Every structure is written in C-alpha cells, then in structure tokens.
Image (spheres, helix red, strand yellow):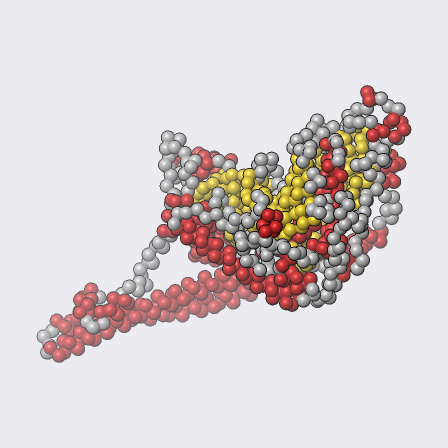
Amino acid sequence: MGKAAAPLCSAGTRGLVSLLSAVPCLACKPPPPRAPTLLVAMSLAGATALEAPSPAAAPSISAGPDTYKGWLFKWTNYLKGYQRRWFVLSNGLLSYYRCLHANILLIVNTSKYGRRTQAEMAHTCRGTINLSTAHIDTEDSCNIVLSNGGRAYHLKAHSEVERQRWVTALELAKAKAIRMRNNQSDDSGDEEPASQSDKSELHSTLKNLSSKLEDLSTCNDLIAKHGAALQRSLSELENLKLPAESGEKIKTVNERATLFRITSNAMINACRDFLDLAETHSRKWQRALQYEREQRIRLEETIEQLAKQHNNLERACRGAPSLSTNTSSRTSKGGSVQSVKPEASDEDEETEYFDAMEDAHAFITVAADPSEHHRRTGSNISGASEGRADDWNLDDNVFESSYPASTDASNKDGVPKKRRRSRIPDKPNYSLNLWSIMKNCIGKELSKIPMPVNFNEPLSMLQRLTEDLEYHELLDRAVKCESATEQMCFVAAFSVSSYSTTVHRTAKPFNPLLGETYELDRLDELGFRSLCEQVSHHPPAAAHHVYSKRGWTLWQDITIASKFRGKYLSIMPLGYIHLEFHSSGNHYVWQKVTSTVHNIIVGKLWIDQSGDIEIINYKSKDKCQLKFTPYSYFSRDVPRKVTGLVTDADGKGHYVMSGTWDEKMECSKITQSTHGNGGSEGKLPKMVYQTLSPKVLWMKYPLPENAENMYYFSNLALTLNEPEDGAAPTDSRLRPDQRLMENGKWDEANVEKQRLEEKQRAVRHKREAEAVVALEEGKDYDGYIPLWFERKVDPVTGELMCVYKGGYWEAKGKQAWSACPSIF
C-alpha cells in the first residue's frame, strides 16, 4: 500500500482515492467525539459569578464541557414558594444544593478534597434528576419544568435569557446522556424489560445481521490478503525491464486493485454502521413497545380497581345504617366535634402543592343559653370575644338572620339595573369518545393537551375568575363592620362562596390566549368594576383587579396547575388573593384550595373541594382557619363540609364558622372558651367553645330554570358572555370559537379553536427566536409584557405577582385600543 500511494497521487483518479482514503479502516478505532463547543461556551458564559467564592476560600474550578452550574429558583410549597438553589449539571445529572459551598466540593477531583466531597454530598445534595430519561419543558416567562416519572421540578431563572442558556445546556446534556445510555450493552440494566417473544425476535434479527456482517468481514479480509499479494506481484513486474507500454498497463492495474480494496473497506464500514443503527433503533423500538404495553396494563388495572371499588361501595351502601340526624340537631343537643386539623387525603399525591395548616387544633362547640349568659359577668368568661351576648341580636344591621336575595329590580343606590339576558342556547347532545382522548393524557399537564370544545363550557377561565364576585354583597356588608373579627367572618364566607358555582360545573373553561382580557363593568348597577388579563400561557396565569366604590378593592394573580391521574383530575390554583378595605385599612390575604374532578373514566363526573384556607389580616393579625373536608362515602359528616375558627392576634377564638361550600355558611359567636380533657399521646387538649345560636352569613342563590341544559350556569354566569359595547378587542366575549360553541356550532368551534392555537403557537415561536437572537447579541430579552398589569414583588407576601397599573378604563372611555395585540 505504501508504494502504491505514490503513483495514485499522479493518476487521474486522485480525487476519488483521496475521498475513499478518508474512510476508516476496519482495524482502526473511530476518533473520540468532539466536545460540544456551544455547551462549553455557554458553561463559561452562563455560570453565575456574582457569588463565586474567592480563590482563598476554595480551589479554582473550571467549568468543563459537561458541567454547567448557577443559581435558579425552585418551587418548594405553598408556604415558601420559590426558593433560591444552586444547580449543577454534570455527566447527564442535574443536582441542586441549598448553598454554593457544597457544589465547590462536588467538582473538585484532587485527593486533598476527595474524602470531604463525599461527606458533603451526603448532607448537602437536595435532589438529583437523570436527564437521559427526563422530559424538559420550556414555558413562557422564565420557567422550566423537568419531569422524570412521577417527580417534577418547577424551576425559574432570573431572566428569559438565563432560562434559554439553561435549556440549551440541559438539552445538550440530555442528548449526550441518551447516546451514552444507548452505547451500553443490552444487559446493563438501564433498559426496560420487554417480553420474551419480542426479545427473541429482535435478537434473532440482530444475530442474522451480525452473521452476514461477519461473512462480509471475512470476504474483506480475503480481498485485502489477495489484493496485497496482487499488488506485490504488480510491484515486482514494475521493477522488471519491460516495454514502456506494458509498464503503463501494469500501473493502471495496480491503481484499480487499490481502488477495489478501498471500496471494499468502505462497503464493510457502511455495513457496520448499518448494524449499529439497527441495534440502536431496536432498543428504541423495544422501549416504545414496552411503554405501550405497560400503559395498557396500567389502564386495565385501573379499570379493574374502579370496578371493585364500585362493587364494594354498592355492598356498603346496602348495609350502611341510615343517617337521619343532621349536624345542626346534634349541635343543639349537646355540641358536636369539629376538627380543623387537616387529614391526609388519598387524592393528594404531590405534597408540594398541598398547603396544610399543621398548627391547627381540634375543638368542640357547645350551644350556650343566651339568657344564662346575659346574667353572667365579664369576669366569669374565659377567653371570650369582645362585647356582650346582647350585642348578638337578630336586629343587627350587619349580622342578618336571613341572607338577602339578589332579585331586586334596583341596586342599593336606587339606580335601575340593566336588563340582562336570562338564558343561552341549550347545550347540544354530542356523543364523544372520552377514552380515546383521555388515555393519552395520564400524567401530563392538562393545560398543554389539545382538547376539543366538547369538554368545555362557553366561558373562559378569565370569566370563571370573575364569577367569584357573584356574592360581592358579602364584602359590601363587611365594610359596615366595626370589629375586625366580625369583618373576618364575612371575608371567610366570601372565600367559601366562590366554590358554590362549581358543584355541578364539571366542564372545562376555555384556556385564555396570551394577552386576552375580560372586563365586567357593573359600577353603576352593583358598585364594582373588574378587569382580568392572561399574563402567561405556560403555566396558565391570570391577573385580576376589582374596584368597588362601596369601600373595598380585590386583586389576585392566579396560576393554574392541573394533573390528570387516571381516576381523577386535580386542579391546584397557585397564588394569593388580596382584599383591602378603604376606610379601615384592613388587608386580608388567602389562597384557594384544591379542586378534584372524580370519575373521569367510569361513572358520573363530580367535583370536590379539599384542603385548608388560612385568611390573615395583616393589619390586626387576626386569622381565620377554614377546613374543606374531603368527601368520604363512609363519613357521617355532612358532604362538602366547611368548618373554621376566627381568632385574634393573641390566638383567642371569637367566632366559629360552619356550613358547606355548596349551600351556606353560618357564624356562631363564642361566649366562653375552656380547655377540655388532656390530650392523648402528647397531643394538646381540645378547646371547648360555648357559642350562641348561629346566624346565616351566606346562602347560595337558586339556579335559573332549565339550568341543566345551560351548563348549570348561575344568573350571573349567563350574563358573563353577553356582548358588551366598547370592550377591548382582546375581550373574551369576542373570542370566535367560544361564541360558536355557545351558539351550538361545536364543529365550527373546534376548527376555529385550532386556528387560534396555531396562531398563538406561531407568536410563541417568534418570541423564542427573538430570545435566541438577543442571547447571541448579549442583550436581555423581557419576553411577553402584560398590557394592563405589571410584575412587582408583593410587599405583604414577598412573592412576585402582577398588579393593575391603570389605563384600561381610560382607554375604554376614549376607545383607544391601538396598544392591544391582535390575538383573535
């Protein structure tokens, strides 16, 4: 070969020889893969240096091509929200720590620090996720979601540029980790087991391919052997003294023999690459087939379990005793036990989203005799609320014995109400294969699954959020309260009343488009005006601001997290609700509970609310702890039960709240509080509260006639999508797919919904491209900026939220909507 190379360089086939000579020989090892230069550059540029240790504090550390590190915010729970953590990406693994020091020791490889590294790792590493099997989900704003099986990490970067750096580094690390995993042998244990028949079939095919490849390799060796002998013979002929014409012919034969040998090497290499590709894809096919088989088995087991549960419930129903005694009668005869301590629910699988009040205690209420209490002196009452029992009378202008109805023809200011519509077109009776859609949604984020309008109701999430104001009169009555604890009772009743519209509303509201708004201007009729805007699409987040001329302002920033778990659907609202009264300055803050939709696969859909609400008055430090008891078939409690206790800054109880979230809430004034018998097993003793007769603070309005054919809408919900003159071009009332669905044209609505989603997807891709350009130019990219709201740090909770910055109602008065984006 060495001697043949010289004549080949001068031959007419020099280009072909040089091309084929680049093909590696079978005996040569392939060159090592090149390091991803992009990841190296981003590791050096993206590593946070703001809080890097000094050289004296720790040895110098260089970020290699497989290492990327920096600060990110990680979601922990409702109480703490997002917490700052130090993340390290190395060798396909993403780990996080509470402090920077642990990470320094992690990546030092010298013998001086080796033993200390393992000790620190055992105590400081908070969690690790393997990127080779993880799913990386990019969201709007600065959010990243990493999921691996049942574990999910919700992360947030400082800026969208920093998020893009992390996403790029994670994707490159994931791709390399997958390649490393695929290069391992089949018996390494990383692959999911397949059935014996599938394994035998795949192994048989690969065995045949390997056998053919060995035959080709043998032929290639023979060709190389005989070709070398032929070239030696030709070289010997060249050394002989032959005529010039014979020498040229021998040289040509020598060139062709060399080309033949090189071509055979190239063919063998191509066959080897084909075998490697077949082996790689066979593992992928094997895993995909196994995943589908496991999904089918899991679904079959779920259905079987549901059938067994249904059978057990039927047998228990036939053998259960009759529950004829209600809660109110038991209370009047000697008191009832009301537990405010949260109990574990089998529906709550993700503890990160469960906001439990661990310090709440159980208590017992006992009905007091008003006449006997009236003869008592103040010194005989232990821990009672301020005021005397004779203050608790049925003529009180705030605590009314019966809840007023909302059917008046005029409002409190004497202004006649505008005539609103009282019905919408009946819901069509469309058949739908629920199973064909839901079987692909298990474990996924519901907001990212394309759903037909058949699952929806003709209202958007912004309108459902506005529907919380249906019982705004509770806040109007709360303005008149002179006592902060009395006012807290009405605020608690208002927080519960927002769930009353969900008891029959199992349909899903439309997911708003980014930049979509909804206004409800009832300033002249009801005394308030409301504005909502969708400020984020993934995760879905809406900002809401309400102003009432009767003395209160409400604002909230709600993010919806939802998970479909096979048997039920969990909807977890994240964010805080703020309520401030103008005259007193009382500022109340609380969060929503988890909503659960049951019987997704088998049976009739029904909704339950469970969890705890803690309402805090940040001015007076009063608190109200409400417990939404999860529904249990075997429980003797009233279904959808809500209990609560209103306490002052010193922890003394003043009022007991009781009722249901779908019917009414009552308030009982505490006249005396004593400690019960000693608790067992180290538990604190229960408090015994003696209360006066309860008074109704809130009672649900009856549904309109024919509500079952109108999506079970209330009177207010029927008017929410009514056309409004002068509304912004981004208003939900102008959304075409929602309007078509309300009119019963579901097929046209599905087509229009798909068009809007594709349009929104194109806008999102454009923003991502702009972010990449800004990253390359070293500029900051702010992403989507809300039009009527701005992101600020809440001084009360310390959380980042969107608050109303003004300008909408002024723009409506001038009809100046040039700043509104074209989203429809």
Q: Which quarter of the rendering shows the C terminus?
A: bottom right
User: In screen coordinates, is 791 left or right of 334?
Assistant: left
Q: Nearer the viewer, residue 23 or 753?
A: 753
Q: Residue shown at 60%/41% (left/top)?
A: 77
Position in image of residue 214 (x %, y %): 38, 67
Q: Nearer the viewer, residue 136 or 519?
A: 519
Q: Which quarter of the rendering shows the N terminus?
A: bottom left
Q: Nearer the viewer, residue 752 or 563?
A: 752
Q: Residue shown at 67%/67% (left/top)?
A: 745
Position in image of residue 484 (x %, y %): 72, 32
Q: Residue shown at 25%/66% (left/top)?
A: 18
Position in image of residue 601 (x %, y %): 69, 59
Q: Is residue 752 visible?
A: yes
User: In screen coordinates, is 184 left or right of 555?
Assistant: left
User: In screen coordinates, is 132 left or right of 639?
Assistant: left
User: In screen coordinates, is 50 left or right of 79?
Assistant: left
Rendered position, 737 above or below 678: below
Rendered position, 606 above or below 71: below
Q: Nearer the viewer, residue 314 or 628?
A: 628
Q: Residue shown at 51%/63% (left/top)?
A: 285
Position in image of residue 184 (x %, y %): 44, 55
